[in-house]
Image (cartoon, grey):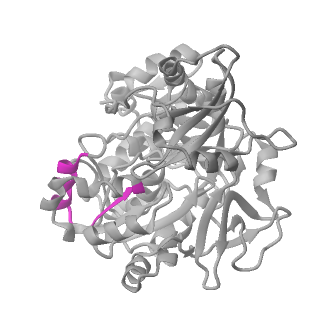
């Protein structure tokens, strides 16, 4: 079944229920959303050319959901991309997925066309977009469970983004898993999108649309404490997803003291490791409403989880070991801890986490070798290191892949290293994650200068900003004479982490003060 059928079914039974809201104002009810989706689908079908994939590079806005569902309605595949990425990063992914049509902001459209002259762009809130919405409606295209629906871009140790192919069947299994493991939902529920709809928040939205829930977008486009308090007070049965970084900062905002937290139904956590202290602090604020999940783009929002009741019970019982875990396997899935040969290890043994089930991706787009390495004998090898205890609780210990998670955003060491290697002042470099109480991790670049050179940190910072999203650039630098390597020439990053942990923070240099950039809506 086409995943777009979820919207059409809901619109038939709950036509006047709010579907998309901007702040406290209803932007579209379900009847309007379904009609606009069916009209936009026809326009997309005629503009996408011979490509089966359509890219979405816009930040959160009321039009996002109608674009996403219109792509599916037309029988095409959506490639939602993080709007915070640099233009060159977005251009690579648009080219990689073969899209000939990209929904962008008006600003992005100009920049992308300079790099992709054969890709058409369409921006919300423009005359061209309004014309597309005047198209005749079209019926939902038939799709099979294994047909691709969403290309979720992730990265591996190579640093080059890979598109995980999520099928209509994958997304349906993920949608149903919400009701099995998180909450029951109905037309009186609301999902507040504090995070990007191109990732976990948007994926969770499928479960709400299937049950006629309201999808609310903050007018600010992101997190503002006073606005969050006002929205909590306005919407009962409110759920929102947030990374641990944001959770651990909430007690800094006095405005939240005026929020009626009885209206909060669930706080969904994920995207980065969360500590027992974070959970206790969140529990003190919200009560038994925290849910913590572990997943990957290759098995979206579903591998293991700590339910709301589990977290509350562990806090009451002072079970630090349980609070430090990522919970038990999600309904309908299997997990295992494997050795390097792919054989299951005994309980309590450390190894690579693997998952099998209906949410596991079909493979990586255009990368058969990477697919064969990742999906082995029906198991998705996650690249994460962990252990299972005798009661089925999974604890994450490390990551095989050099992924740094800062503020809930994945940063891949190799792509940062590749950019900095362009500087003639750098002979060698290794990028690692530096533990940070607020952000989880920050990027640290360990640099071997070229002979006779003294790298200019401001210039290196500018180089990164030219090629990478701002959040990916190193926040600190450390200079060494050489990098430790093993016999095969691989940098020993664990040894580097141990060495850096013994250093005085004052020895780690900052290129400049970090500036917060707010991203504007395309409207």
Instruction: Pick whichever, 394 or 522, lies toward us.
Output: 394
Position of residue 153 in the picture relative to residue 112 (left or right): right
Left or right, 263 with respect to 203, comes to left
Residue depicted at 49% across the width and 53% down the height: 4
- Camera-side residue of 83 and 441: 441
Q: State the count of labels.
A: 0
Name the image quarter holding the C terminus.
top left
Q: To which quarter of the image does residue 292 belong?
A: bottom left
Q: Please report the bounds of the magenta region as a residue range.
A: 224-244
Looking at the picture, tell me which residue is in the foreground, 104 or 483. 483
Do we see residue 375 in this rendering?
yes
Q: Residue at x 12, y 60 (%)?
A: 258
Q: Is residue 262 above or below residue 347?
A: above
> Residue at 59% of width from left, 70% of height from top?
395
**Picture coordinates of residue 80, whole percent (x, y):** 51, 41
* Residue 226 is one of the magenta-drawn residues: yes
Q: Quadrant of the N terminus?
A: bottom right
Q: Is-magenta flag for residue 283?
A: no
Decide if residue 218 is on the left or right side of residue 461: left
User: Where, by quadrant of the figure, is residue 88 drawn?
Assistant: top right
Give whichever of 24, 84 is nearer the camera. 84
Q: Position of residue 87 (x, y in %)?
A: 51, 24
User: Which percent across, then down, holds residue 436?
Assistant: 45, 49
């Amino acid at each position: 079944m086409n995943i777009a059928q979820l919207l059409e079914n809901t619109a038939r039974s709950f036509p006047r229920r709010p579907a998309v809201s901007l702040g406290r104002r209803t932007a579209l009810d379900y009847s309007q959303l379904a009609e606009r989706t069916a009209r936009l689908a026809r326009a997309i079908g005629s503009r996408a050319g011979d490509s089966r994939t359509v890219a979405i590079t816009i930040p959160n806005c009321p039009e996002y959901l109608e674009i996403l569902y219109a792509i599916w309605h037309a029988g095409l595949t959506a490639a939602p991309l993080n709007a915070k990425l640099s233009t060159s990063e977005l251009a690579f992914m648009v080219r990689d997925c073969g899209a000939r049509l990209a929904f962008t902001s008006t600003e992005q459209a100009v920049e992308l066309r300079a790099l992709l002259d054969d890709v058409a762009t369409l921006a919300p809130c423009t005359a061209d977009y309004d014309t597309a919405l005047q198209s005749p409606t079209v019926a939902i295209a038939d799709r099979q469970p294994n047909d691709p629906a969403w290309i979720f871009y992730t990265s591996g140790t190579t640093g080059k983004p890979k598109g995980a192919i999520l099928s209509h069947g994958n997304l349906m299994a993920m949608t149903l898993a919400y009701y099995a493991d998180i909450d029951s939902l109905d037309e009186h529920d609301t999902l507040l999108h504090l995070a990007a709809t191109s990732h976990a928040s948007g994926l969770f939205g499928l479960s709400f649309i299937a049950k006629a829930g309201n999808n609310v977008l903050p007018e600010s486009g992101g997190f503002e404490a006073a606005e969050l308090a006002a929205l909590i007070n306005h919407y009962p049965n409110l759920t929102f997803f947030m990374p641990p970084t944001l959770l651990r900062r909430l007690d800094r905002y006095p405005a939240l003291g005026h929020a009626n937290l009885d209206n909060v139904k669930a706080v969904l956590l994920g995207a980065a490791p969360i500590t027992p202290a974070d959970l206790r602090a969140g529990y003190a604020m919200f009560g038994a409403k925290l849910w913590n999940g572990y997943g990957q783009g290759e098995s979206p929002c579903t591998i293991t989880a700590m339910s709301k009741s589990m977290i509350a019970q562990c806090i009451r019982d002072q079970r630090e070991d349980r609070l430090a875990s990522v919970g038990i396997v999600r309904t309908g899935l299997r997990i295992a801890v494997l050795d390097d040969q792919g054989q299951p290890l005994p309980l309590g043994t450390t190894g690579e986490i693997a998952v099998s089930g209906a949410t596991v991706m079909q493979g990586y787009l255009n990368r058969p070798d990477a697919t064969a390495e990742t999906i082995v004998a029906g198991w998705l090898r996650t690249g994460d290191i962990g252990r299972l205890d005798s009661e089925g609780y999974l604890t994450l210990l490390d990551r095989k892949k050099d992924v740094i998670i800062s503020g809930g955003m994945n940063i891949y060491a190799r792509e940062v290293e590749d950019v900095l290697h362009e500087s003639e002042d750098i002979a060698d470099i290794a990028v690692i994650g530096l533990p940070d109480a607020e952000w989880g991790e920050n990027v640290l670049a360990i640099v071997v200068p070229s002979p006779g050179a003294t790298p200019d940190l401001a210039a290196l910072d500018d180089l990164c900003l030219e090629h990478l999203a701002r959040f990916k650039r190193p926040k600190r630098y450390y200079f060494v004479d050489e990098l430790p390597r093993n016999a095969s020439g691989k940098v020993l990053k664990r040894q580097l982490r141990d060495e850096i942990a013994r250093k005085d923070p004052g020895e780690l240099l900052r290129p400049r003060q970090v500036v917060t950039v707010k991203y504007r809506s395309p409207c």
